[in-house]
Image (cartoon, rainbow, N blue to C red):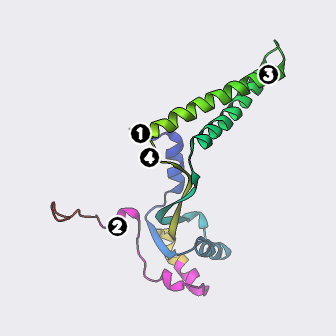
Amino acid sequence: MSTQPNGLRTVRSRLALEYPMSLGIFEKYEEAQKTVDTLSDAEFPVQNCLIVGTELKQLERVTGRLTWGRVLLGGALSGIWLGLFIGLIFALFTSQGSPVGIVVATVLFGALFGVIWGAITYSLTGGRRDFSSVSLTVPSKYEVLVEHKHAQRAREILGAGGLGGASAYAAQQVTTPAAAPEQVPPPAGSI
């Protein structure tokens, strides 16, 4: 019995290729996209292709220093948005009292809740992360894969098309994550 939810299983089945073979590895997404566009222009069944971002990096841009003032202000603003949302819902479905009064009350309660929640969570960090940041995971390279039964035709199209970097298509055989060699840990005490 599978432990994956149905939605995840559906997504994985749409992304799966039968015995994928590599057509090339590219430094930029636009190069991988151009490869698939070239195949599409030649009426190749591109639904048998997959562009995979590999060698992932996480970038984290520090946006500022966290202070008590910033934490409490951020908590208040988050609480105001939550209170506004809940207040509008209540105002739509109630016939008692003023809708404006309901919205104002929930906004005030939301701001208070946000300030308290922000203060609690910030105090629990103990000063270990006194900065705010945004992060993004990006691939360093892009690999174009194709189902094995279409690989030869795809290579012929790409080789005849004079596409820049055609050497990337030469002699690359099955390259899937499962085909990568296993990493053997160093013996104990050798570090």
Q: Secondary structure at mark 1?
A: loop
The image shows residue 121 at horizontal and vertical percentages of 51, 35
In the rendered structure, which segment of residues is drawn in magenta? 155-181
Residue with the most extreme top position: 96
Sequence order check: which comes first, mark 1 or mark 4? 1
| 64 with respect to 20 (left or right) | right
Reading the image, the residue beneath label 4 is 128
Q: CA distance from mark 3 to mark 4?
A: 41 Å
Q: CA distance from mark 1 to mark 2?
A: 25 Å
Q: CA distance from mark 2 to mark 4?
A: 38 Å
Sequence order check: which comes first, mark 1 or mark 3? 1
Q: Nearer the viewer, mark 3 or mark 2?
A: 3
Question: Mark 3 is on which residue type?
Answer: Ala
| 168 with respect to 93 (left or right) | left
Residue 67 occupies which quadrant of the picture?
Answer: top right
Sequence order check: which comes first, mark 3 or mark 2? 3
At 65% across and 27% down in the image, what residue appears? 112
- In-front residue for pair 83/159: 83
Question: Mark 4 is on which residue type?
Answer: Arg
Residue 175 occupies which quadrant of the picture?
Answer: bottom left
Reading the image, the residue beneath label 2 is 180
How crowded pointer 4 is (Cα within 10 Å; few <14, some 14-19, many 20+) is rated as few
Question: Mark 1 is on which residue type?
Answer: Thr
Q: Compared with residue 71, is residue 187 higher up or lower down, i.e. above or below?
A: below
At 68% across and 37% down in the image, what residue appears? 77
Q: Quadrant of the N terminus?
A: top left
Number of numbered discs overlaid on the protein picture? 4
Q: Secondary structure at mark 4?
A: loop
Reading the image, the residue beneath label 1 is 3
At 79% across and 22% down in the image, what residue appears? 91
